[in-house]
Amino acid sequence: MKRPLALSLAVLLLLSGCSSTEESTTIFAMDTVMTLTAYGSHAREGLSAAEAEINRLEKTLSVTREDSEVWAIDHSAGAPVTVGTDTAALLNAAAALGDRTGGALDVTLYPVVKAWGFTTGDYRIPDAEELADLLTRVDDHAVHMDGDTVTLPAGMELDFGALAKGYAGEQCASLLKEAGVTSAILNLGGNVQTVGAKPDGSPWRVAVQDPEGESEDYVGWLELTDEAAVTSGGYQRYFEENGVRYWHIIDPDTGAPARSGLLSATIVGKSGTACDGLSTGLFVLGPEKALDCWRQSDDFEAVLIGEDHTVQITAGLADRFTLREDSGYTLRIVEE
Ligand code: AMP
Ligand code: MG
């Protein structure tokens, strides 16, 4: 009688070990709640590495921590600063994505973002004169990089808030894979990074939030495999004054919250960093220019939700996005 029991236990253990042991961890970092979920026998060790990476990146990239590299750059008063590989990689990515979006993504907007109170929560509406003055200190082409040395002109400040979470997701995906994880989904406060497919081999399903609904309402869902999906939207962080909503994504042309006709922009692609930078930049650009950027690119697809309640999806998502039947939005597929 003892043998079959021992055998069946071993089989059970084996089954749970090789199919889909789920491990999950929730942390607060980079100003947001993050949930990391990984599957398989290497899940725990992969998640430990990912969590350590996020904490390390936060320490390096935070604009408010006095021991970060970004703080050192912002308080350098024009002197050269030596940085590590992450800051250098982000500066290079930000420069390239800034150019690709015609300057709509500009990491040197930080003095303007601060003036609106988006870093502290002390919200206020700067007047036109103040904004014009602050905008003279905004220009990502003025950031000078030479190997691992960065020089930022005195008076300017930069911040990677628009793309750091995407970068963190991408780095975590690499570490999870190095640890042997082939299936994971990381939700870094709305920045989703997937590793491989679901344990059963089918694509991950990721909901796209209804920008005018409650946080659990969604307009539809995406199917993703080994990709990132990142959303920027005016509903994510904002304040209201006299019935007007002011959100955290700023148009570098005006210094004011970007009013481009979009309620949200979701970018899907292999690089989490590019998706994050582009989601912010394309939200600023608005639907037409965002689609022009897509036509000139081959590394991303987009879901653009307009104030007119259209959901425009680019051709590469035609088979991978499903509009919820009673969403109240109209779907349009954008061909090349
Ligand atoms: P995201 O949520 O990725 O769209 O990033 C928005 C954050 O990036 C804001 O909270 C600001 O800190 C910063 N930001 C706002 N507007 C811009 C912009 N046009 N370019 C670069 N960073 C921005
Ligand atoms: Mg972004």
Image (cartoon, rainbow, N blue to C red):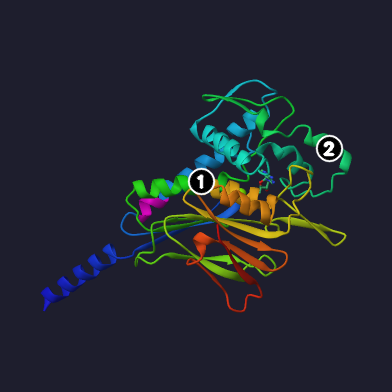
Dot 2 lies on which element? helix
Look at mark 2 in the image and give the residue it sits on: 132
What residue sits 57% from the left and 51% below the top?
Answer: 295
Q: Position of residue 308 (x, y in %)?
A: 72, 67
Q: Is residue 307 above or below residue 191?
A: below
Left or right: residue 190 versus residue 37 is right
Dot 1 lies on which element? helix
Q: At label 2, which amino acid type do we have?
A: Ala
Q: Is residue 83 above or below residue 125?
A: above
Quadrant into which the N terminus falls: bottom left
Residue 311 visible to an observer of this rendering: yes
What residue sits 48% from the left and 66% below the top?
Answer: 320
Residue 115 circle label: none
Instruction: Give the number of callouts.
Output: 2
The span picked out in magenta is 43-47
Q: Quadrant of residue 333?
A: bottom right
Reading the chain from its start, which is encountered first: label 1 or label 2? 2
C-alpha separation, residue under disc 1 versus residue under disc 2: 33 Å
Q: Position of residue 60 (x, y in %)?
A: 55, 36
Quadrant into which the C terminus falls: bottom right
Q: At label 1, which amino acid type do we have?
A: Ala
Residue 31 visible to an observer of this rendering: no
Main secondary-structure element of the magenta-colored stretch: helix
Magenta-span inclusion, residue 46? yes
The one nearer the camera, 93 or 156, is 93
Look at mark 1 in the image and give the residue it sits on: 168
What residue sits 57% from the left and 34% below the top?
Answer: 91
The one nearer the camera, 330 or 234, is 330
